[in-house]
Each structure stands twice: as C-alpha cells, then as structure tokens.
Image: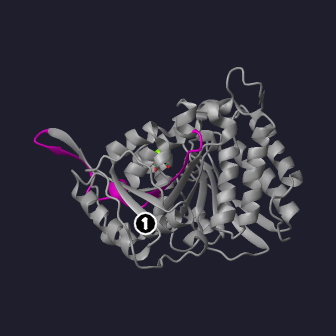
Amino acid sequence: MKYSLAIFSSQITVLSAFVATSTFKRTQFGLNAVSRKDTYDVTLLPGDGIGPEITEATKEVLSALCKRCNFKIDLKSALIGGSAIDEANDPFPDESLQQCLKSDSVLLACIGGYKWDKNPRELRPETGLLKMRKEMGLFANLRPAKVLPQLLDASTLKKEVVEGVDVMVVRELTGDVYFGTPKGIDIVDGERVGYNNMIYSEGEIDRIARVAGDVASKRSGKLCSVDKANVLDVSQLWREVVTDVISKDFSDVELSHMYVDNAAMQLIRWPKQFDTIVCGNIFGDILSDEASMLVGSLGMLPSASIGESGPGVFEPCHGSAPDIAGENKANPLAMILSAAMMLKYDLERPDEAQLLEDAVEAVLDQGLRTADIKQDGDNCELVGCVEMGKAVAELVTTLELKVPITV
Ligand code: IPM
Ligand code: MG
C-alpha cells in the first residue's frame, strides 16, 4: 500500500498487521442497524436556531427521494436543546429519548443559542446532546471532510493543499474527559479548583478501534490513531489497545500513530496524508472542527453517531447559527448530506444515499450557493435555505441515475 507521509519517526509507528475479521456487529461498513424495508420510522429533532429551517429543506428533499425511489419515511418530530428547555424544562426529555429509541433512525438539525448560554449546566442545550449520546449508546462518531471540486475556493488554505482531501474522523463519543468522574469545582485551600477526569477503559477503546478498523478497511486502508501518549497514561493505554485490535483483527489496515499536537499541525500542513483518523472524544471534537475548515464551510459537513445496535443519530457538524436564524440564509446541505449518511449507515439504502450526494454536487454545479459558501466574484447565484432545498429536491427527482435504483 502506498503511504506518502512526512514522517516524524519518533511520532509515527507504521505497523504491519496480520490475522482477519472484525467482531464489530453492524454489517455494511460494519455499521447498518436496520435491514432494508419499505417504510421507516425516523425521528426528526429540529432543535434550535437555523435547525427548523434546514429541517424543512431536508424534509422536502427526503419526500422527493421517497417518491422517486418508491419507499416511505414516516417522520415524527421530538424536542431537544433550547426548544426542549423552553417547552419541557429539560434539554432532552425522556419522551424524546423513548421516541428516538423506538425509531429506525434519528435525524438531528442543531441545538443551542445565546438565550440559554447562561443557564446552569443541567439546563443547557449541550447537556441534552450529551445525554442523548450517552443514553442511546452512540459511542462512534463519523465525521467525513471531503473537499468538493466545486468549493475549492471556499477554503482559506491554498488550492493545492486542499484539492482532493478526503478525510474521515472517527471520534469516540461517550467517554473521555466529557463523561469521566470525578469532576466538579471545589474549594481547596481557600480557592476554587476545577477538575475533570480523562478516562478510558480497555473495552471502550477496543470497540471504537473496531469501528475505525472497519471504516478504514472500506476506504483506503490507512488509519491514523491520534493520542498524547508521550504525556498521558490514558493515551498510552489507548495506543496499546488500538495497536492490538488493528494488528490482530484488521490485516488489511495500515495503522500509524500521531500525537494530537502534531496531528493538528499536519492537518493544515498536508491534509492529504490522512485518510481515516481515530481519536478520543475531546481530541476528536477539536480535530473534526479543524478538518471541517479544509472544506471551507461547516455548512457542508454531515456526521453519523452510532452504537453497537439500535438507531443512529445523523446531524450536521455545524451549530445552530442563532445570528442568522429565521432569515432564510442557512445552508441546508450538511443536513441533507446527514440524511444521506442515515440512508447509507442505518437504513440500508446506499443507492438512495448516493442519489442525495449526487444531487448536492449537481446543485453546486448549477452554481447555486448559500452565503457561507459564496465567494466574492465567483459568478454563482446567491440563494436562501428554502431555494437551496427546493433545488436539491428538484434534482433528486430529475437527475440521471449513475446506478439504477431498485424500486
Ligand atoms: C460537537 C459539539 C458538541 C461536543 C457540543 C455542542 C457539546 O461541539 O458535536 O462537536 O463538544 O461534542
Ligand atoms: Mg465540536
């Protein structure tokens, strides 16, 4: 396997691997939860800020897709985030959790806003998101960052650096310093001391390593595990377990390791050296935002959060953009691409997912741009969220299929 990489030899170990087969349960990509059906139940979580607008646009696109491909998605909304705090005084009410758990899949827009920023932690929108991840067992978060040729100029980095970039960040989502205990703010010797616990068990590392191994082997076979093993004990264990899992069970995957500070630097220096990256929760939070900027706008990036079984949650990487909420300025493409990930990873409809992705590329080829991806003097047409949604829906209906879809 070809692997050109600027090697800082003390920091990267390339391991050759042997033995076979993954034990991770999901099937296609190791990841499907539901078998293909004619009708699916999907919970919609419109959330806050621009959430309801991009949700409407995505609904229109999904409805066109179902019509063309002759299947049904029954969408039922539920509350999360600030709107849930306002209505139910809980950022993720039990009713929402139960509804999500009994659905085939969950599509989430975005949460948060200035209005709730000063609330105590238990009444903050983010707390609802973290509760959802934990209660639904969504330990694996897949965040692809693929540079589309149509948007090459949207990145702040040089064209030659970002052209062709196609990175998948596999982020552990239910452990680490996000959930570790003890945590708190105490008074020690008369002053306040704040602390959290960066902690991973072997089992938690093992299962995310298997997802990453599966994902990497379905991509180019290159997997880079990111840690801070030169300083942190938790990272030393991370490195040992990832190495073990990949070398024993993923013979086709070429594993390297990189310290997180170096990875942050390499991602903007020469992002094409990466294919699949696996990391813990907090490093993944930071690196996935960084990776998204290679693409130019967070408005283009989808994500998938999945567990060992049960429904996954599919959501854009971007936030709720309260500054432009209600102004028809939001970019719905990340949510539409999240719906594509849902079709591929949860609903066993990869051809339909492809059609959505093709329609998004086609709408960009037509020169339509929302404000976040419009460049000065690019001759493209500035459109709002509603118009962008309608244009994608139209393309989903009319676009010539690359692969015939069984209807
Ligand atoms: C993300 C977000 C969340 C996180 C916040 C909103 C809790 O930044 O999904 O990356 O830190 O995981
Ligand atoms: Mg984040």
Q: Nearer the viewer, residue 388 or 143?
A: 143
Above or below, 191 relative to 337: above
Query: Which colour scheme appears in the figure?
Result: one colour
**Is residue 52 shown to the viewer in this render?**
no
Left or right of residue 134, residue 384 in this image: right
Spot the residue most to the right. 398
Above or below, 225 relative to 309: above
Left or right of residue 297, residue 266 in this image: left
- Give the amino acid type for the residue marked by disc 1 in the picture: Ile
Residue placed under numbered mark 1 in the picture: 208
The residue under the point 53% across, 57% down is 142
- Tell whether position 165 is magenta: yes
Q: Position of residue 179 (x, y in %)?
A: 36, 58
- Tell whether position 175 is magenta: yes
The residue under the point 51% across, 73% down is 308
Q: Residues within 10 Å of mark 1 (few under 14, many from 20)?
A: many
Q: Which residues are magenta?
A: 163-190
